[in-house]
Every structure is written in C-alpha cells, then in structure tokens.
Image (spheres, helix red, strand yellow):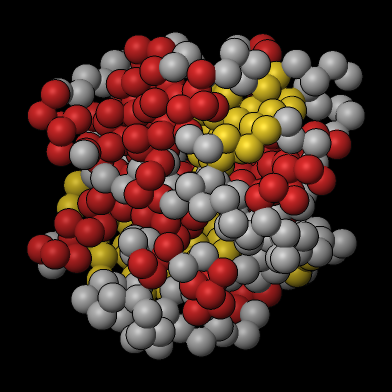
Amino acid sequence: MLKDIGLGVVGAGLGAHLLAVNQDPSSRLKVRGVYDPDPQRRGLYFAGKDMATLAQQHEVEYVAREYEELLARKDIACIAVFSPCPCHAEQIIAALDAGKHAIVTKPMAVSVAEARAIVAAADRAGRKVLVAQLMRWNRMFQKIHALFEEGTLGTLHMAEACYLHDMRGVFDVSPWRHQMPQDFMYGGVCHPVDLLRWFLGEVDEVFAYGSRAGLDPRYPADKLENFIISLKFRNGVIARILGAFDLVHPPSLWNIPFHGVGIGLYGTKASLLNNRLIRDGRESGVWKEETILPEYVFDNHAGETPSMLHHLEDCIVNDRKPLVDARGGAQIVAVCSACWDSIRSGKPVKVTREFDRVTTAVSDTEREDMG
C-alpha cells in the first residue's frame, strides 16, 4: 500500500509507539519526521535506544531540530503530539494553524481555557483532532462495549471505574512528570472518565476528594495524587472513580489486566467487572459467571496503537469524526477541571456544557492566559 499520509511525531518517549506504523503494509500512514527537544532522549518503551537510533530503525526520514520544521513540511499531513502534557495545547494549535490534522496522547489539555482554544482552532482549520484515549482501542474494553451495545447488560443504573498506578518507576524513565510536574487528575483520571463517558454519555456533576501519600519525594509535596470522585451523569446514572498514583501497586484488583485501569458496569440484565460478567439468574435460578475474553493478555499498547492509527487514517481519508475528537477531549478536561473545583470548594460542582455548542470562541485574553 502506498505510504502517502505523512506523520510528524513530537516526543520520542511515548511517541516511539507510533514509529512501527512504517512497517505496517496495511496502512497508508508513514512517520516521516520526529522531533524532541532532547535529542538524546531515550524512548520510554524502547530502552537503550536514543531518538536517532529509533528513527533509523523505523526508516524515519529525518530528525527535526525544531518543532517548526515538522509544521513546514508539505509531506506531513498530521502531527502526533506525544510530548509532556503541559506542551499539548500550544503544539496542537500550532499544528492546526499550519493546516495539519493532529493526534494527541491524553490528556488533550490541562485546563478548560486550553481545551477551549484547541476546539476553536479545530473549528477554524477544519482539520481532525484525535485524542488518543487508548482504552477505546483496548480489546477488553472494546468487547465490553460490544456487549453493552448488544443489550447484554440491559439498562445501566450504576457504574465505577479506576486507574491505579504506582508512578515511581514511571518517574525514573520520564522525569518530566515530577519536574513540571504532571497533574494526575488530567493525566491519569482522564482514563476512567473517558471509559465511563463511552457508556454513559456526558457528566453533569462531580464531587471529589484528593490526598497525597508522599511515597516519592521527587513529586512536589503540595500536589495531590490520589482521588476519589462521585459522578452524576446527564442521564441520571451515578458512578464513582478511584484514581490513585501515589501508592504501592496493589494486587490484581477486579482481575485488572491493564496497568490498573478497570471498569464496573451494573445493568438490569447483568453486572460486569472487567473480564467477568454475571447474568441475572433470579428468574431461571441459574447465576452463571462468564469470562468474556478468556484469551486476553496485556500487550503494553502493542495492540491498541495500530488500531488507533488505522482509525486516524480512516478519519482523514474518509472524512469521519474521530472517536474522541476535540470536543470529546474538551469534555474530559471539563470533568477533570470540575473535580479540582470540587476538591478546593468541598462542594459538588456542575460540569460546563459549553463544548456542546457547534462553535467555541476563544478571546485574546484567554490565549494570553495560556501563555
């Protein structure tokens, strides 16, 4: 297949995942250039190989010295923003303003103001923005969603989700997370927030608590890393989220096969916890527990990333709406922002509905606030 859709990758840590698309004969995508402010940075999932080595291994044509070099290339149609979270908004907007599509690792942004500016830029440019909420392409969660769509669970009346991750080892290989530092409400809780949105739609109100254990002294002592969140969705369903990143990694809670990300769905016909489902047996007298995906094995993003990139290609080629587009990413950011407001105020907080609108404007003052 002709490799005629050029990608420019920003960030050689997480972004190293994308380079393998160059060896995918079923994809028109090709990573043509990569940029990282630290040319000696070693890919997070390619230990021992620096950016130049990775580029050569995957037949990437050039390593850019500045981000603007990628934006200026006519053979690049889409920018993949896999840089540290605080850089996302500025780099996405620059890509859109340069006429490029954009794919960005989660979170899309780290404030409502940034999300608003990205949505406005996407509207102006008429280009695609795909937020890489990778759980949408995880085989287990896709199977769960298929069961939900088929009606196996019935009508959902309650749900829960979690993301549990001892971040100390991650700090070792991506020190920006404690140096900038990463905000784990936006950068971590976004996973369970989006999983629940996939099944329940948009969130109406949240109430949140936050705490810190202080296991890793590298992370600032005044920043919170552990969260318990209650949510009420617009359809009336209530749910809860446990997001914990400052902890000794626990045993396999809920039979979670993927880095502590899990979901529980409770419907009128069945209840489900990740890979296990039990159908209502009150009428039949038979309560049978099933394993919904017996052969599932955690694959360290190796399965999710190719599926996500094929989705990106389909959106670009066939002008389809991305599964999580700029407005979807903004909704996730809005939920996380409301959680912070709740933690600070000690009260329930409504989630803004501004991203429901067809167009979203951003003022010059808000642009200045973004830096």
In this orientation, does residue 161 appear? Answer: yes
What percent of the width, then of the height, locates residue 85? 41, 50
Q: Is residue 160 left or right of residue 22?
A: left
Q: Quadrant of residue 202?
A: top left
Q: Residue at x 51, y 87 (%)?
A: 248
Q: Indicate the position of residue 150 as horizontal and vertical percent values.
A: 69, 39
Q: Is residue 345 left or right of residue 280?
A: left
Q: Position of residue 124 (x, y in %)?
A: 35, 12
At x 53%, y 46%, the residue is: 36
- The image shows residue 354 at horizontal and vertical percentages of 24, 29
Q: Which residue occupies 41% across, 34% down?
A: 91
Give the answer, above or below, for where 123 lies relative to 344: above
Residue at 41%, 13% in the rendered image: 125
Is residue 155 in sight in this rendering? no
Give the vertical position of 24 relative to 241 (above or below). above
Of residues 141 and 109, the one nearer the viewer is 109
Quarter of the picture holding the N terminus: top right
Q: Quadrant of residue 18?
A: top right
Quarter occupied by residue 252: bottom right
Which quadrant would the C terminus be assigned to in this image?
A: top left
